[in-house]
Amino acid sequence: MAVQPVQIMRAERPAAAISEAEWKARVDLAACYRLIALAGLDDQTATHITLRVPGEDGHFLINPYGLLFCQVTASNLVKVDIDGKIVSDSEYGINPAGFVIHSAIHGARADAHCIIHTHTVAGMAVSCLEEGLLPISQKSLRFAGKRLAYHDYEGKADDLDERGRLVQSLGGANALILRNHGLLTCGPTVGRAYHAMMNLEKSCATQLAAMTSGGTLIRLSDAVIERAAQQHSRDDVQGENGRPDPWPAHLARLDKIDQDYKS
């Protein structure tokens, strides 16, 4: 298999002014980085959260390589295109492995506006289990069946050739377990992707707690599993007939702690 290492370059054209829509996207994405850090789900300078730039085909925002999640702000996020060129005026570079994973999904899934990837202890532990995530808790049932996908480990994701296989593994799911690696969720908004990641992380932690308790796991019937999964899908729809969007509440909580993410 030929290896195609990614090369991060800078675009020759000058960076355009930041639109109001892009600035809002930057604030939401920076907030997500801070919230992931507050939850203890970050991994020093590794892992990434990306978001498409509204109105700019093929452009997305990613964290500056070398900064902690708690240091990410709206202004220091780096804008790149789908080919790996940095198109914003930034002093920072980006992680090639992060670019490969996120550009693959952004390029193939028009509905995946936000993508979150983590290396948590619980997530990595479940990714190392042959059986993966088990549908044994209410949290994990939202990922039952084809709602959760798996991608086999190929080494550090810095090979462009892996992008096609990663997209094939994900299919139409919004949650992915990268075997022997970690977790990934995507969604139409930052809030939806964040909500999915928090539920996937808690599902993994619950499974590990149950497996190490010494007790016998209660296995649910296929009918109950599917019914619960459909209930979650119904309740996750936001709007007039769905649940309220919790993202504003998360932002309000963050504002009371530190508003530096908006800078």
Image: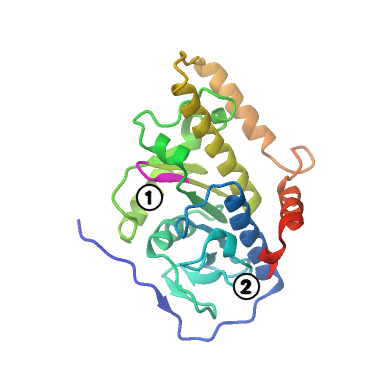
Give the CA distance from mark 2 to mark 1. 30 Å
- Residue type, label 1: Leu
Residue 39 part of the magenta segment = no
Q: Position of residue 190 (x, y in %)?
A: 62, 53
Q: Which residue is mark 1?
A: 166
Marks 2, 1: nearer the viewer: 2
Q: Would you call the spot at circle 2 few (<14 residues within 10 Å), some (14-19), or many (20 or more)?
A: some
Q: Tell me which residue sits at (62%, 34%) in the image.
A: 233
- Give the residues in magenta: 179-183
Per the picture, the main secondary structure of the magenta-coloured stretch is loop
x and y percentages locating residue 185 in the rendered image = 52, 46
Q: Please identify the quadrant where the C terminus is shown.
A: bottom right
What residue is shown at x 27% (from left), y 64% (from top)? 4
Q: How many marks?
A: 2
Decide if residue 24 is in sight here. no
Residue extending farthest right = 240
Q: Position of residue 101 (x, y in %)?
A: 41, 56
Q: Nearer the viewer, residue 183 or 106?
A: 183
Please give the label number shown on residue 144: none
Sooner in the amino-acid sequence: mark 2 or mark 1:
2
Q: Is residue 201 above or below residue 27?
A: above
Q: Amino acid at mark 2?
A: Ser
Which residue appears at 43% of the width and 39% of the height? 149
Q: Which residue is mark 2?
A: 75
Residue 197 horizontal/vertical position (percent): 56, 43
Q: Callout 1: helix, strand or loop?
A: helix
Can residue 209 be seen? Answer: yes
Residue nearer the viewer, 43 or 7:
43
Q: Quick check: 54 above or below 172?
A: below
Q: Nearest the camera: 223 or 128?
A: 128
In terms of secondary structure, where does tag 2 sit?
Answer: loop
